[in-house]
Amino acid sequence: METFSSKDMAMKAQKKILSHMASKTMVNMFIDDTSSEILDELYRVSKEHSGNRTKAQKVVKDLIKVAVKIGVLFRHNQFSPEELGLAEEFKKKLHTGAMTAISFHEVEFSFDKAVMAGILTESRDMLLKLVDKHLTPKSHGRITNVFNHYADQDLLENLYNPKGKLWPHLTKICAGLDKLVEDGKL
């Protein structure tokens, strides 16, 4: 028996089209200014840390593609009640991660790279579980790429070094995260 659904086909097409439009211009259409500024700073951190513009662009593009696809899944009510519970846990983990990142930035000598890397790794695993039945292995690879990149302890150490070249970017990232938390968006 053939199972064809125009609704499913439309959703797949929308995910595909939106994932191809993950440029900075398109981000501004789908993501608010604060989030866009955070993404810009994450790009700069990746570029300066790796010395590789292409790698930095790929990581941020992967992040945007995944966010757009998950947004499409939510908008089309594709998650089961259990998955929605997991999504809520993931949202809480992101909030905890944001608060931890801000706290490590504000309180001198409090940074613990293992704690930050652990939060990012747990977030990655939760997100992979959430989208397991909904996204392709290629999208799973994008999620892994993004979280593994930013959970790299060498990158985190350089980012949280108050005398380092990445510190100004961290300051802007934390200001953006703080605004998202205050606005109830994170």
Image: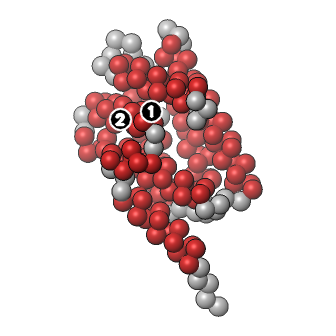
Q: Amino acid at mark 1?
A: Thr
Instruction: Name the residue: 51% across, 72% down.
Output: 10
Q: Position of residue 145 (x, y in %)?
A: 43, 47
Residue 91's place in the image compared with 108, above or below, is below
Residue in front for this viewpoint, 50 or 86: 86
**x, y percentage for residue 74?**
61, 55
In the picture, which quadrant includes the C terminus?
Answer: top right
Looking at the rendered structure, which numbered label has been put on residue 61?
A: none
Mark 1 = which residue? 34
Q: CA distance from mark 1 to mark 2?
A: 10 Å
The colour mode here is secondary structure
Q: Residues within 10 Å of mark 1 (few under 14, many from 20)?
A: some
Percent position (x, y) of residue 105? Answer: 48, 16
Identify the residue at the far bottom of this view. 1
Relative to 90, residue 128 above or below: below
Q: Amino acid at mark 2?
A: Asp
Q: Nearer the viewer, mark 1 or mark 2?
A: 1
Q: Is residue 148 visible?
A: no
Disc 2 marks which residue? 40
Q: Earlier in the sequence, mark 1 or mark 2?
A: 1
